[in-house]
Amino acid sequence: GQQVMQIPQYQHVQEGEDFTTYCNSSTTLSNIQWYKQRPGGHPVFLIQLVKSGEVKKQKRLTFQFGEAKKNSSLHITATQTTDVGTYFCAGMNYGGATNKLIFGTGTLLAVQP
Amino acid sequence: GAGVSQSPRYKVAKRGQDVALRCDPISGHVSLFWYQQALGQGPEFLTYFQNEAQLDKSGLPSDRFFAERPEGSVSTLKIQRTQQEDSAVYLCASSLGVPGPLSYEQYFGPGTRLTVT
């Protein structure tokens, strides 16, 4: 079935350094969403990407959807301690075998002050 | 307004017991999802409701798992004869619309942490 993988699994950075997580799907996606889960918390929606090659920015966060709509990335510029948490991508292949969101494996970001 | 709420927040069950987990979605949200999240993993889809209709239950691990949303609002996930492998956080999420080429964001509840001893 459809699989969504993320790398790296874990990243430890010094505050102020940049961070990138990559998401790869085994199938073409209709759309992809990104969520952030703080330690002990629940996933919180960040953004949705729909178009091939789409790039969206939210302050220090930049999200990109690949041309083939099978991969995505999240880049954080100048990390802060408030960025700590696990970042999940979640993809859907609408009209495919199933219309559910498939969550990636997640990237845990640790930020050292 | 109020977000998605779940109860209980923590549940310890002895192997073989039945448990019922409750989800109160955001009022007016058509879609309701249940996920299972193991430690260090992403949420895994269990089942999906559109109003009171259970349209997708492909993620339910076994026939011991049963979910309902009889009036299209509150939902209950029931696990019969719990096993140790059922230990996980069970997350409920709701969204305003239905899945499509342009999906709606999902609002997650705080989850119920189930421990089966």
Image (cartoon, rainbow, N blue to C red):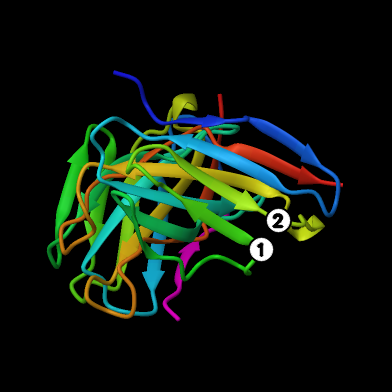
> In the picture provided, is A25 more to the left or to the right than B115?
left
Q: Which residue is rendered at x = 62% and y = 30% of the image?
A: B8
User: Residue B33 or B102: which is nearer the viewer?
Assistant: B33
Secondary-structure class at tag 2:
loop
**Residue at the disc numbered 1:** B64
Circles 2, 1 touching at the beta carbon (< 8 Å) = yes
> Residue A45 falls in which quadrant of the image?
top left
Kindly give the residue lying farthest to the top in the view shown.
B1
Q: Which residue is rendered at x = 39% and y = 63% of the image?
A: A23
> In the picture provided, is A98 more to the left or to the right than A54?
right
Stretch of the chain drawn in magenta: A1-9
Residue B110: where, in percent of width, then height? Answer: 52, 32
* Disc 2 chain ID: B
Secondary-structure class at tag 1:
loop
Which circle's residue, 2 or 1, is located before the other in the chain? Answer: 1
Residue B103: where, in percent of width, then height? Answer: 21, 55
Q: What residue type is labelled 2?
A: Gln
Question: Is residue A21 depicted above or below A109 in this figure?
Answer: below
Residue B71: where, in percent of width, then height? Answer: 34, 42
* Disc 1 chain ID: B
Quarter of the image where the C terminus of chain A is located: top right
Q: Which amino acid does label 1 sit on?
A: Arg
Disc number for residue B80: 2
Disc number for residue B111: none
Question: Is residue B98 depicted above or below A2 in this figure?
Answer: above
Q: Can residue B42 be seen in this view?
A: no
Q: Distance between the residues labelled 2 and 1?
A: 5 Å
> Residue A79 falls in which quadrant of the image?
top left
Q: Residues within 10 Å of mark 2 (few under 14, many from 20)?
A: some
Quarter of the image where the N terminus of chain A is located: bottom left
Q: Is residue A53 visible?
A: yes
